[in-house]
Image (cartoon, rainbow, N blue to C red):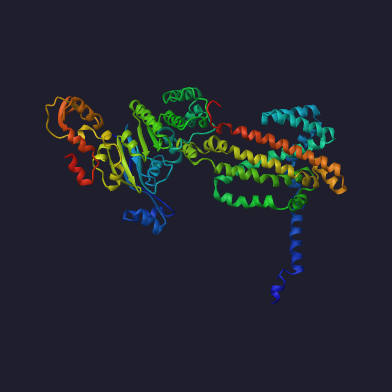
Amino acid sequence: MVSDVKVSIKNLYKIFGPNGKDMVQKVEDGASKASLQAKYQHVLGLSNVNIDIPARRIQVIMGLSGSGKSTLIRHLNRLIEPTSGQILVDGEDVLAMSDKELREFRRNKMSMVFQKFALLPHRTVMDNVCYGLKIKGIEKVEMKERSQKWIDRVGLSGFEHNYPAQLSGGMQQRVGLARALATDAEILLMDEAFSALDPLIRKDMQEILLDLQEELHKTIIFITHDLDEALHIGDNIVILRDGAVIQQGSPQEIVLDPADDYVRDFIKDINRARVLDVSSVMKPGSTDSGLELASNLVLELAMPAMVKADVTSANVMRDSEVIGMVTLADMIGGIAIPESHEGEQVTYR
Amino acid sequence: MAIFDEFPSMGRADLMDLKKGIDFAFSDFSRENGEAIEGFFDPLMFCMVWFEKLLMNAPWPLMILIFAVLAWLGARSIPIVIGTIISFLIIGRFGMWEDTMATVAIISVATFLCIGLGIPLGILMSRSNRVQAVITPVLDIMQTIPSFVYLIPVVMLLGIGKVPGLIAVCIYALPPIVRLTNLGIRLVDKEVLEAAEAFGSNYRQKLFDVQMPLALPNIFAGVNQTIMMALAMVVIAAMIGVKGLGVNVLKAVSNQYLALGIMNGLAIVALAVIFDRVSQAYGKRLQKHRQGGHGV
């Protein structure tokens, strides 16, 4: 998928400890996170991270706790200084910015949503949403107007004068989202934004985010440890482990072709039928069953359609052209949990 | 061995010389600079005198009304307001009105002084671990050293009067506000601070929009402590010439006047309880937004 690159992370290293800079060479020479810790008492935060984040899409960065994902996202707006490497936003080097430039950059270019909401407890919902605009120095009337728009947009009308402590977790995070959107920044950083919410509320928030994205087309960088969430909302996914990128690709690519056992472990429990689409289990040829399925239809919906039409094969369509065919057996094979890497290759070829 | 039987202290003559040296050096210093230092504190003196006169000369019904209004503004509680009015009526009835006003004056000035010095100092301390490491032992000394010990140099420098008394009170009452300001700011939720940072706050915006408001409950606990400690110093300040209830307590102690001692002692207690209840209730109201529940 070629689209213009919004944020480009190049050879990024973060090593926590007094002599981080000297340790980069050791990591480049192959020192592992464990050996760095045991031998030199330095903690490897990020190791040679290279990611090109496309504009106007949702980029998910996922990994378990300790994988460095929260560290990585904090490098993008330089809440954490890297040990070495480069971060380019619209071609501009974030690391070269002066304090003043950095503040302007944070005020206008990037905004952030936090795991534990990080709202100001002594301010009302309205004042919290105004926060970013106030820092930017927007005058009062316009500030209120813009904030009201976002409060309405995230469904919090009527709660403007409540304090955060009076709201549920889901509502608090809507305030966090509205606050981040109100600054009109092109890039939205979301640090485990929905992880602290109940599963149902989390689903809700995911839908709100996807709805918003449909009209706003922001560049969203979303951190999560939840693969279901990653697959659901991500256009692209990067998987981190011990501070290093082990795989990046579309949700389909991750599920169909996990890079190693770590990723395979991750995808073991997910609902494959919800992620994989018809094109991923398609083979060349055509059939005369009479059923036509869109190539991006997920298997979860395609299979019942086949059963309903009482056929075992269907043509795969893209732009009203037949680009291949699928059989029910291929689909079932596709959603079966692969035993091993090779085994999986066999199941869908 | 002889060395274990007796501590190998400096000789009597050496020790005497050392003490003399220090004493003379300090008295020379105070002789040379005493006036300049007194001059430095003149505005403070002026403030104190002015405020004391204001309180003492105002008609008593007006003062009681003002105290009642302040108590209401602070606590928003009818019982506390009624308690305040009754306390001051009893104090006046027992002939302690003027002394009480003098005590209220020095406590108020000392408290404002401590707030004015202590909060910036606490902010400074919260900014850097090094500053904290330097200031903390100083605060420890201020709180634990017997008050009489620092009365000596203060009196040598400034003589006897209101200003040295005020300084003695402040030395004792300053530490809690500094400590609790520092603590309050350090305890501010890291994620909220990070959010302020992420939205591009500069230092001032961070301090005044986030750190200070979130630290306010702690800072206010510090103010409360400072008031209480200032009241505790009333009697000692009286020893170096501060007018007020403390003078009567001293008189009662030296002459064994039981009734005088108890009456003035209870007046100090009444002031302490009023200040404490009002300031605590105010502190609690500051935190109202922290309570959950819809439709509050």
Residue A218, given in percent of the width and then of the height, sits at 35, 30
Residue A93, given in percent of the width and then of the height, sits at 36, 41
Q: Nearer the viewer, residue B166 or B62?
A: B62
On-image quarter of the N terminus of chain B:
bottom right
The residue positioned 80% from the left and 47% from the top of the image is B239
Residue A168, given in percent of the width and then of the height, sits at 47, 31
The residue positioned 63% from the left and 40% from the top of the image is B221
State the residue lying farthest toward the bottom. B1
Q: In the visual, does B219 lie left or right of B228?
A: left
The residue positioned 59% from the left and 37% from the top of the image is B216
The residue positioned 37% from the left and 39% from the top of the image is A224
Residue B128, given in percent of the width and then of the height, sits at 55, 47
Q: Nearer the viewer, residue A44 or B282?
A: B282
Q: Nearer the viewer, residue A97 or B160?
A: B160
- Quarter occupied by residue A332: top left
In this rendering, the answer to whether B294 lies above or below B117 is: above
